[in-house]
Image (cartoon, helix red, strand yellow):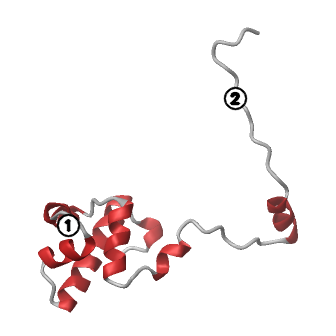
Amino acid sequence: MLPSELQTPRDMARMLARRVKALRLDRGWTQQEVAERAGLALATYRRFERTGHISLERLLKLAAILDTRAGFDQIFVRSPAQSLAELEQRAEPQARKRGKRRDAQT
């Protein structure tokens, strides 16, 4: 298996679907049971297992019933500052840059 940095989004989605399916099978649950427990339509859950396509909200519901929510709080977390200068730069408020209006006259 490739490291996550080298996987495409599609590969990662399918990997998550395989992991969810494995957890479902470990518990001896049917697809119908998982769908009902998570509040999903059976067709939605089946499509997820087959393709990896699912909304974030539905994925979180699956994580909740499978007791695997622990890692979600680390998604999109800023990496620690590598230097004091970087830490100071992060502390300074960033002014938003405004774009030019297309219809503005020069």
Q: Which mark is residue 95?
A: none
Query: Element type at marker 1?
Result: helix
* Residue at 66%, 71% in the rendered image: 79
Q: Which mark is residue 45?
A: 1
Q: Up-down: is 95 above or below 72?
A: above
Q: Is residue 8 left or right of residue 20?
A: right
Image coords of residue 95 (percent x, y): 80, 44
Circle 2 Cα neighbour tier, 10 Å, few/some/many (<14 / 14–19 / ≥20): few
> What residue would you read off at disc 2?
99
Dividing the picture into quadrants, the one containing residue 1 is bottom left
Circle 1 Cα neighbour tier, 10 Å, few/some/many (<14 / 14–19 / ≥20): many
* Residue at 23%, 77% in the rendered image: 37
Dividing the picture into quadrants, the one containing residue 32 is bottom left
Image coords of residue 50 (percent x, y): 17, 65
Q: Amino acid at mark 1?
A: Tyr
Q: Amino acid at mark 2?
A: Gly
Q: Quadrant of the C terminus?
A: top right
Dividing the picture into quadrants, the one containing residue 58 is bottom left
Query: Element type at marker 2?
Result: loop
Q: Nearer the viewer, residue 95 or 67?
A: 67
Image coords of residue 27 (percent x, y): 21, 90
Mark 1 or mark 2: which comes first in sequence?
A: 1
Image coords of residue 65 (percent x, y): 31, 80
